[in-house]
Image: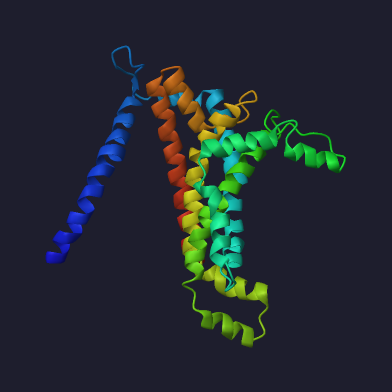
Amino acid sequence: MYKARHAWSFLLPAGILLTTFTLLPALAALGISFTNYNVFQPVEWVGLDNFKTAFQDEEFWSALRNTFYFWVLVTPALVVLPVFLAILVNQNLRAIKLYRLIYYFPALVSVVITAILWNWLFASDGIFNYLLSLVGVNPVDWLTSRKFVMPSLAMVTIWQGLGYYMLFYLAGLQSVPTDLYEAAELDGANFWQKHRHITFPMLKPIIFFTAVISTMSAFKEFTLMLTMTEGGPIGASKTVVYMVFEKAFKELEMGYASAISFILFIIILILTLLNKRTLDQET
């Protein structure tokens, strides 16, 4: 009983903050999604009309396709590549902590600063096009082409997220008993065989966690689109969250924006449950 009281005393402040700034606003937004609300006029109950409008809105479907495309580009890379990066920095080498810091450093940089930096790199006369010119390749319209804008934004996201997800895998690697690797070496296992039969099975819970977190991050990405492309060109980088921002704060369609945000919430929830089911079947 004594320990339980102390546990609740530690959980209570976080619970109050979570309820005040997350749960209650979410419930309020859910209520607004059933209304026609534009801040300046009285609230008008419209029921499911906002949700029906969303499913009939080509702009919403286009934004949803862009969001899924961005997710496909980003999440597999952020699930797989950090594993190898974590293996690399898990070696017992001199100054290895410095290398870990270098790889993690992009995660510490503000997204706005990152956007400014990569805007310069992606410029028509930027470094990337200069490097392409050295090998005789014509300049690429990285952020002004419908074909390249999403891969370019995905490249920025992957660069910034690699070190962040690397830490999760690094923590998992350091909990794997070294005896397993030594026994595998005695049995003649090479580098890839050791990691295939030991590392990856031991990291399955972390792989699931990373897949869920990177999925939610990809579906919620907004700052890069706002600061680098403003949803362009011609809506090619307009995601669902960016559309929510436009509807809510530019067009003041608060009810419609809330409805779209809850549709996105349901999609993320379904993807998370599918990820969990897949992991449970493999374990």
Q: Residue at x 55, y 37 (%)?
A: 113
- Check the image and name the residue furthest to the right: 136
Q: Residue at x 67, y 85 (%)?
A: 188
Judge from the rendering whether residue 88 lies leftward or rightward of residue 255; answer left or right.
right
**Picture residue at 85% right of the left edge, 42% below the top:** 134
Q: Residue furthest left?
A: 1
Left or right of 270: which side holds 103?
A: right
Q: Report x, y in % for residue 94.
A: 59, 71
Q: Is residue 1 visible?
A: no
* Farthest-out residue, top: 41
Which of the two residues, 139 or 267, is positioned nearer the viewer here? 139
Residue 161 image point, x, y percent: 55, 49
Task: Please tell me which residue lies in front, 27 or 47.
Answer: 27
- Return the x and y of residue 43 as percentages of the image width and height: 29, 17
Left or right, residue 176 beside residue 136: left
Q: Position of residue 152 (x, y in %)?
A: 66, 38
- Compared to residue 83, the image places residue 195 above or below, namely below
Q: How many marks?
A: 0
Quarter occupied by residue 192? bottom right
Looking at the figure, which quarter contains the N terminus?
bottom left
14 and 35: which one is in front?
14
Colouring chosen for the image of the structure: rainbow
Q: Is residue 240 visible?
A: yes
Residue at the image position 86 percent from the left and 43 percent from the top: 135
